[in-house]
Structure formats: C-alpha cells, structure tokens
C-alpha cells in the first residue's frame, strides 16, 4: 500500500456514520456524518446524501494531501435487541455498501468480534477496553472522539492489518 492511499473504517448507527481514515504510517483522521432529524426517513436520506458526497471523489484531502481510498471496512450489524433499531441499522449499513458499490470502491464487511480480536486481542472487548487501547496506541488525541469514531478508527486499523497480512 502506497503512502498516498488510505483505508476507511466505518461504524454505523441510526443517527450517524463514523468514518476513520488511516494511511500506512497509521496517521488518521476521523469524520462524523450525522443527522438529528426526528423523522427516520428524513434522517436516513440525510445520512445517504452526506455519505454519497463524502465518497464521490474517491479520494480525501488530509492536511492538503490528496489520499486515494484503497479499501473500506464497514462494521457488520452487531446483535441488537430492538427489532426496529436492527431494521434501521441494517438499512444504514446496506446504504453504505450501495454507495461504495456505486463508486466502484472496494469494501469489506467486518464482524465486530473479528476487528476487536485482531486489534485489541479480545473479541469481546468492552467500550472501555477499546477506548483504553486506543488512548495507548493512538495517543491522547482520541479523547475528543466519540465512541463511534474510536470504533471506526480501530476498524480502519483492522483493515490496514488485514491488507498488510494479505500482501
């Protein structure tokens, strides 16, 4: 993987899409696309428009450097108790897949236990353990990030590890 390429890690919720970019040197940036509209259909469409706009150029400017997207790793839908939330989350993840497909960007779905195991060493790591690992590994700059952004960051690192082990 070249230095002008990045991996994207994505963690979806029914209100936001957290995105973390990571280059081969583990330099990262995070983005949070969100909607607070109370109406689900409006919120879903708003997230779609934001994600579509985010990916349509197939590259991202980070500190004035143009970085091409090498691959996108999207967290699969975790176990959700609430059927309505499960249905909405399924739609958001599916929409992310569709937008990636629309722009011919390679993407992979990743199970939350898989990325936690490969990055943290514990497939059942708690939110606290993920935040602690991230603080130690990525530094104190993660303190300002939401839990979804921290998860996306770890997912992008999982993607980087996956691509490096396959080459």
Image (cartoon, helix red, strand yellow):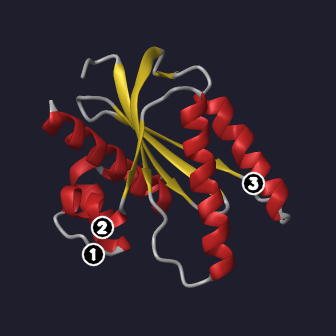
Residue 122, image x, y percentages:
20, 70
The answer to whether marks 2 and 1 mark residues whose Cβ atoms lie closer than 8 Å is yes
Q: Is residue 37 left or right of residue 14?
A: right
Q: Quadrant of residue 13?
A: bottom right
The answer to whether marks 1 and 3 mark residues whose Cβ atoms lie closer than 8 Å is no
* Residue located at (22% from left, 51% from top): 137
Using a 10 Å C-alpha cutoff, classify the residue at mark 1 as few (fewer than 14 neighbours), some (14 to 19) or many (20 or more).
Answer: some
Q: Is residue 67 above or below residue 79?
A: above
Q: Which residue is mark 1?
A: 124
Q: Which residue is mark 2?
A: 113
Q: Is residue 93 left or right of residue 118?
A: right
Marks 1 and 3, the one that precedes in the sequence: 3
Is disc 3 placed on a helix, strand or loop? helix
The residues bearing labels 3 and 2 have C-alpha atoms spaced at a distance of: 26 Å
Is disc 1 placed on a helix, strand or loop? loop
> Quadrant location of the C terminus?
top left
The residues bearing labels 1 and 3 have C-alpha atoms spaced at a distance of: 29 Å
Q: Which mark is residue 44?
A: 3
Using a 10 Å C-alpha cutoff, classify the residue at mark 2 as few (fewer than 14 neighbours), some (14 to 19) or many (20 or more).
Answer: some
The residues bearing labels 2 and 1 have C-alpha atoms spaced at a distance of: 6 Å
Residue 10, image x, y percentages:
47, 48
Q: Is residue 18 left or right of residue 1?
A: right
């Amino acid at each position: 993987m070249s230095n002008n390429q990045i991996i994207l890690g994505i963690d979806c919720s029914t209100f936001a899409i957290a995105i973390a970019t990571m280059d081969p040197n583990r330099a990262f940036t995070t983005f949070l696309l969100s909607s607070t509209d109370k109406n689900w259909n409006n919120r879903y469409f708003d997230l779609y428009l934001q994600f579509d706009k985010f990916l349509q150029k197939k590259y991202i400017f980070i500190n004035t450097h143009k970085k091409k997207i090498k691959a996108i790793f999207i967290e699969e839908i975790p176990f959700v108790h609430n059927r309505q939330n499960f249905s909405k989350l399924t739609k958001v993840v599916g929409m992310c897949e569709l937008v990636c497909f629309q722009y011919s960007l390679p993407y992979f779905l990743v199970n939350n236990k898989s990325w936690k195991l490969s990055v943290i060493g514990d497939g059942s790591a708690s939110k606290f353990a993920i935040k602690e690992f991230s603080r130690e590994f990525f530094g104190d700059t993660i303190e300002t990030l939401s839990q979804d952004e921290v998860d996306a960051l770890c997912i992008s690192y999982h993607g980087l590890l996956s691509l490096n082990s396959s080459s």
